[in-house]
Image (cartoon, grey):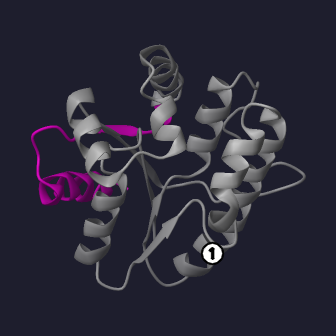
Amino acid sequence: MCNLIVLTGLDGSGTTSVAEKLHKLDAGSALLNGINEPYSTVREAIDHVTRVDSPTAHYLFYLSANVHASFLIENALKSRNVYCVRHLIDTVVSHRVSGLNVDLVYETDSYKIRKPNLIVFLSVEEALRQERLEKRGKSYLDRTLDNDSFRDKFLKEFKSFSGHFKTVNVSGKTVLQIAEEIRTLMNFL
C-alpha cells in the first residue's frame, strides 16, 4: 500500500529540504507541494490582494488548490508513496489565524481531499528558523510571521490539531537524521 506523507511547520522549519531527502531515499516515490501549477503562479498576488481584504476568498483559493493537489496525489498513490509539502492542515491553520471558523474536513458534499496517512510537524527553534529564512529570502508570509504575537497564533492553532500529526524537532539535526526519524514513524503505518 502506498502512503501520503505530509510535512508541515512554520516556513523555515525545513519542510521542503526534508521532503526532498525523503523522496531521494524512497526510490520511485513522488514529491508534491500542496500548491501546484496553476495555483503557484498566482499565489503571491492572491496573498497580497485577498488575505486581508477578503479572508474567505483567500481560503477558497487555497482550498481549491488542495482539491487540485489531491487529484495529483491520488494518481501518484496508485503506484508509489507521495511526500507532500503543505496540505489541508496548513490551509486550515492559516485561515483560523485570520479569524475564519474553518476545520480540518477532508470530505464534504462539494469536495474530497486525500487524507494523509501521516502528517509530520517540523518544530524548530526560532533563531534557527530566522537564520534559514534570511539565507533564502523572506516571502510575504515569512515577514508576517516575524511578529511574535502572530507567530504564536499559528503555533497555537497547529497545537489545537496536534492529535492529527507527529512532531519532529529538527533543531540540531541533519536533514538525513530528520528524514530517518520520519521513516521510522512510517514503519508504524
Question: For the point 25% across and 45% down, which residue is it?
Answer: 132
91 over 38 or under it: above or below: above
Q: Badge 1 is on which residue?
A: 72
Q: In which quarter of the image is the C terminus?
A: bottom left
Tell me where residue 177 sits by quadrant.
bottom left
Mark 1: amino acid: Leu
- Give residue 129's position: percent from left, percent from top: 28, 37
- Mark 1 is surrounded, within 10 Å at the Cα level, by few (under 14), some (14 to 19) or many (20 or more) other residues, namely some
Q: Is residue 106 visible?
A: no
In magenta, the rendered stretch is 163-189
Q: Give whichever of 183, 23 is nearer the camera.
A: 23
Question: For the point 49% across and 84% down, which residue is it?
Answer: 79
- Give residue 155's position: percent from left, percent from top: 45, 24
In the rendered structure, the answer to whether residue 179 lies left or right of residue 174 reads right
Tell me the SS state at disc 1.
helix
- Give residue 187's position: percent from left, percent from top: 27, 59
In the rendered structure, the answer to whether residue 58 lies left or right of residue 172 reads right
Question: For the point 56% across and 52% down, which residue is it?
Answer: 87
